[in-house]
Image: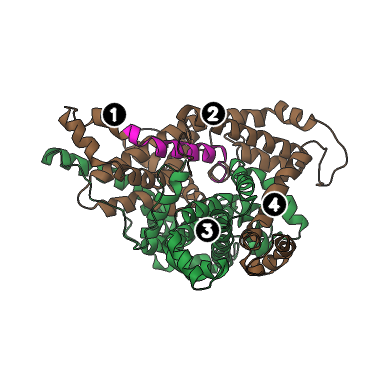
Chain colours: A green, B brown
Amino acid sequence: MTTTVPEVSKTGTSPTGPRRSRRGGVMSSTGLYIGTGIAGVLFLIPFYLLVRNALSTDPDITGENWKFFPTNIQWGNITEPFRDTTVDFGQSMVNSLVVGTLHTVGTLLVCSLAGYGLARIPYRHANKIFYAVLFTLMVPAAVTFVPSFVLVSSLGWVDSYRGLIIPGLFSGFTCFLFRQYFLGFPRELEEAARVDGLGYWGAYWRVVVPNSLNFFAAIATITFINGWNAFLWPLVIGQDPSAWTVQVALSSYMTNQTVNYHLIFMATAISILPLLFVFLFLQRWLVQGIAQTGIKG
Amino acid sequence: MSTTTTRDLARPAPAKASKARPRRGLRGSSTFNFWLFTSPFLIGLVIFVYVPIGWSIWLSFFEARFTVTPDKFVGFDNYRFMLDNNDFVGSLGTFTVFAAFIVPTTWALSLGLAMLVNRLRFLRAFFRSVFFLPTACSYVAASLIWKMSLFNGVRFGLANTVLGWFGVENIAWLANPDPPWYWLVILTARLWLQSGFYMILFLAALQNIPQELYEAAAIDGAKPGWQTFRHITLPQLRATSTAVILLLLVAAYQAFDEFFNLLSKTTWGRPPLVELYYTALGQNQDYGAGSAGAVMLTLLIVVVTLFQGRIMGFGRGDESK
């Protein structure tokens, strides 16, 4: 289902061609901006509520006279989740950073190598193996969480980084994306490397990877976001609070006996911050990556 | 740890490679290289994907309570148990309805946003970012905002505050299944989280439509607006639409995070995965029944996927690679 085969854009120019329609006068373009603006405000309201409540006192959040713009801003709230004793929020942030980073590095390494092997190295049974990889796309990972949990617990990996990270590395989908990408990689570059006496391994690391950094960055950002936001698997594996990721910690706030509103909102806001950084600085790759990868479903 | 696995896994390869008459030595042999590149992934795939699938199917035929190495074969009893279990069957039905709502609405909203953004001349990148931003939010974080602030059942929730201006009584959005307002909470949260991501897909696809098509249509007298949308834009977006709907369908049946968090103490609105979670990892630890449920859910997803593929011509004529 790859109707639109992504070009290997080594130059990294974004494909946003200025193909806007020229029809419509002032009236319709005003309407366009009003409509887009309203939709934009609606999309931003949840973020505003999050920040507003994170920086308010509890009475300002739950009081009778709920104000959209509070006057009493509590900057001191920022450190509060880290001082809270019921949930070790700092530890959960560290866990998420470690898990998210290693998940991304591991997935990229394992899946890109396999994708390259399947795309470029001739082997008699390569097609059969590729179908075996495709088959796993039919079975959603979330559905096999029960036996996966059983397997991981019999390995003794419950409550450990290994248990949180390793089972998620072998994504058939990511492998598939890399294979499709490498199929479109210019052969001449590899042949030049071969002439210079490099084997597959050397050509891969010295020529193919350095010329594919855009694609790697795109996949990396998406993988990191998914790893950071994952909930079901960390919930199952993190039995002990010390192994909770930040998502599991947030979830536990919601079922706690005492509800400390401003603290919960501040913790949520902090948990989103790393991804906001990813969005601000890596959006080009992210958009490109989604455009290239998502289409192939 | 991947280095250690690589080493372990690479071991069987040379034996095979030696048979395939090495011309340029072992390192040049492509069989050896094939396994060198793919074995870390393939071994992991077998252990962490194929083994759980197989184990799940095996467990589903055994009485497996509090144990994962059962010895009492019970045939299809677990399947019968899960099918007699109204909660599970009900949740499968509920989720088919849920998918029937959320898939078209997300599709329409993300396509609409993409078309809006695509027509902007100024602030285009800004609005694209605004609509895309919720993708950074996790389902857990969104559930929290929705439950504690936006749709809080008490009077300070934003929705109730706004409704209060019009003299509407407070609505218990999540705490009361009748009328089922909780669906509104869940649908809006999911729409907000998902739409931006699919908007990016549609934006890319819109920009790939050759402008000449619109010019030709204009010469032929087609009115811009509905006519060109219906006869040019929509058909040109078919491949993307198919992919988006497929992704949305699979995601809908796997819904877990927001239901688990929004409706944590309730008995209503439980999706299949939450049911399985409580069956297998709850007090009974019934792995057999849980696995039977997982097998049935997988089959349902596969059937729906293939059915949708049939209708939409999934992959038709573009498997030429």
4 and 2 marks in contact (CB < 8 Å)? no
Work out whether residue B126 or residue A184 is closer to the camera in this orientation and state it: A184
* SS under mark 3: helix
The circle on residue A181 is none
Residues in magenta?
Answer: B234-257
The residue wearing badge 2 is B307
In which chain is the residue bearing label 2?
Answer: B
The residue wearing badge 4 is B46
Work out whether residue B275 or residue A13 is closer to the camera in this orientation and state it: A13
Q: Where residue A10 appears, x then y in whole percent? A: 37, 62
Q: What amino acid is labelled 3 in the image?
A: Trp
The residue wearing badge 1 is B231
Q: CA distance from mark 3 to mark 1?
A: 41 Å
Q: What amino acid is labelled 1 in the image?
A: His
The answer to whether residue A68 shows anywhere in this view is no
The residue wearing badge 3 is A228
Residue at 55% from the left image edge and 33% from the top image edge: B305
- Choose the circle earlier in sequence order: 1 or 4: 4
Q: Where residue B141 appears, x then y in whole percent? A: 49, 52
